[in-house]
Amino acid sequence: MSIINLIAIDGPAASGKSTLAELIAKKLNYFFFDTGVMYRAVTLAALDNVTDLDNESLVTEVANRIQIDVQPASKQDGRVMDILVDGKDITWQIRTPEVDHNVSKVSAYAGVRKAMTDQQRRIGERGNMVMVGRDIGTVVFPDAKHKIYLEASPEERARRRYVEVQKRGESISYEDILTSIRKRDDLDSSRAVAPLKPADDAYVIDSDGKTIDVVLQEALQILGKPVS
């Protein structure tokens, strides 16, 4: 059965899918759910409970043991949602450099992905939601009525991220960002379980050279919603 009021948006790292999804959610008064936070939450829990994150079995046990939930933001501290693990607010703890460094490895584990898929479905069934990830339209909700795959070239994505980090005063080169994005693309697209790819029935939007406003208008037209 189609999920009428769930919009699935997938795409590679730094493609702008979270920004697009948040704008669509505001426009339609839907809940914005970036599923990447769930893998960060598992990574945080694994760092707290497992001595060796290369041990897939132990990390998977952690993923199966914890319950993750997302709720509307309860504080005006820059968050777009509350992220809870077993009822504890860990919204900002998942943004540490240690989590950044390990989340790709943890999210590639088959057992972790299965556990998170089950939890994402539980949350998504609430409806009225824009759900963002890398396998929402292909694995999590393959029967979703609305699917968008947002893509951009590695060079364009690296340029955008470089502008962002420059504004924050961080010291990292464009070349390093581009290398990191290409590495993440390779990991996401080559993993054995739920590789990154557009669903067969997804609308693909190439955002190269487009402003977010143009991309938003294109997405709203695809969804059959007013663009003004």
Image (cartoon, rainbow, N blue to C red):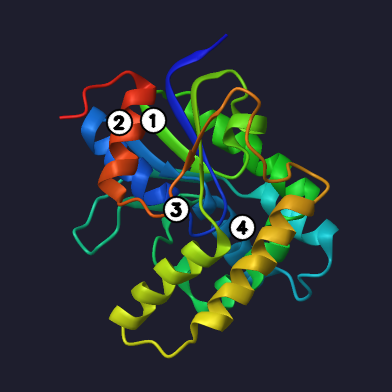
Label 1: which secondary element: strand
**Sequence-first disc among 1 and 4:** 4
**Sequence-first disc among 1 and 3:** 1
Check disc 3: other Cα within 10 Å, few if <14, some if 14-19, many if 20+: some
Write the residue at 49% across / 86% down: 173
State whether residue 106 is above or below residue 218.
Answer: below
Circle 4 is placed at which residue position? 42
What's the CA distance linking mark 1 and mark 4? 22 Å
Q: Nearer the viewer, residue 173 or 7?
A: 173
Q: Where residue 143 is drawn, which disc sits there?
A: none
Label 3: which secondary element: loop
**Which amino acid type is marked by label 3?**
Asp
Circle 3 is placed at which residue position? 208
Percent x, y of residue 11: 55, 46
Write the residue at 82% across / 60% down: 56
What's the CA distance linking mark 4 and mark 3? 32 Å
What's the CA distance linking mark 1 and mark 2? 5 Å
Q: Where residue 30 is drawn, which disc sits there?
A: 2
Check disc 1: other Cα within 10 Å, few if <14, some if 14-19, many if 20+: many
Percent x, y of residue 34: 45, 47
Circle 1 is placed at which residue position? 129
Q: Nearer the viewer, residue 86 or 24?
A: 24
Residue 48 falls in image quadrant = bottom right
Write the residue at 62% across / 63% down: 43
Marks 4, 3: nearer the viewer: 3
Confirm or deny contact between disc 1 and disc 3 (CB under 8 A).
no
